[in-house]
Amino acid sequence: MADNWVRPYQPGSGRWLVIAWEAFALAMLSWATVRQFDLIGHGVRVVACLLAAVWVVGAWRILQLGVYVSADGVLIRGLLRSRVMTWREIASVRLHRATHRLGPWQIESGATVLLDRLDGATVNTELWEKGVDFHSRPTLFRAVYQEIRTRHRTAAEPT
């Protein structure tokens, strides 16, 4: 598989807001843990270092989240795992309009890009029209979707 993965979009500034929120939440967790267990000295340092390490790893993964493409396939980096698929494994690239039902109301949550595999499985790309990367940039979302479709179509053409 290729080593030249390219993310066909620049991440949104909302990622930094998420990272800052996580830092605040982990600081509050650290404070609550120290208070709850009456930690002092080394205990405070251990809790602080452990949660700081969790934050650093989490922040790095948040910055790396996304869909990357190459001539060989697509790489989907999620928060906990990454997945690589060759273009030959993908039957189609499509948009899915997600809606949620709340009693008698339908609440639309925007479009997501899905990959339909040849084996019948569907893979979520984590590209979401209302997400932190595309919320204020809907034309970029469509452009990224078209880029992925074009790369898939080009890879499927016989040479």
Image (spheres, helix red, strand yellow):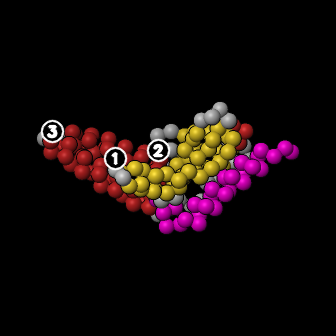
Label 2 packing within 10 angstroms: few (<14), some (14-19), many (20+): some
Q: Residue furthest top?
A: 119
Q: Nearer the viewer, residue 33 or 128?
A: 128
In percent of width and height, residue 123 lies at 57, 41
Seen from this angle, which residue lies furthest left? 38
Mark 2 or 1, closer to the camera? 2
Spot occupied by residue 95 in the image (x, y as percentages of width and height)? 59, 52
CA gap between label 1 and label 3 equals: 19 Å
**Residue 43's x, y, as percent?**
21, 39
The residue tagged 2 is 79
Describe residue 130's horizontal placement relative to residue 105 as left or right. Answer: right
Magenta segment: does it hold 153?
A: yes
In three-dimensional space, the C-alpha distance between marks 2 and 1, rounded to whole angstroms, equals 17 Å
Per the image, label 1 sits on a secondary structure element best described as: helix
In this picture, residue 155 sits left or right of residue 54: right
- For image coordinates 42% across by 50% down, the residue present is 100
Q: Residues under labels 3 and 2: Cα distance?
A: 30 Å
Is residue 102 on the magenta stretch? Answer: no
Q: Helix or strand or loop: what does disc 3 sit on?
A: loop
Residue carrying label 3 = 37
Residue 156 seen in render = yes
- The x and y percentages for residue 88 are 73, 39
Q: Which residues are magenta?
A: 131-159
Image side of residue 121 versus residue 47, left or right: right
The residue that disc 1 covers is: 52
Within 10 Å of disc 3 (Cα), the crowding (few <14, some 14-19, many 20+) is: few
Mark 1 residue crowding within 10 angstroms, few (<14) / some (14–19) / many (20+): some
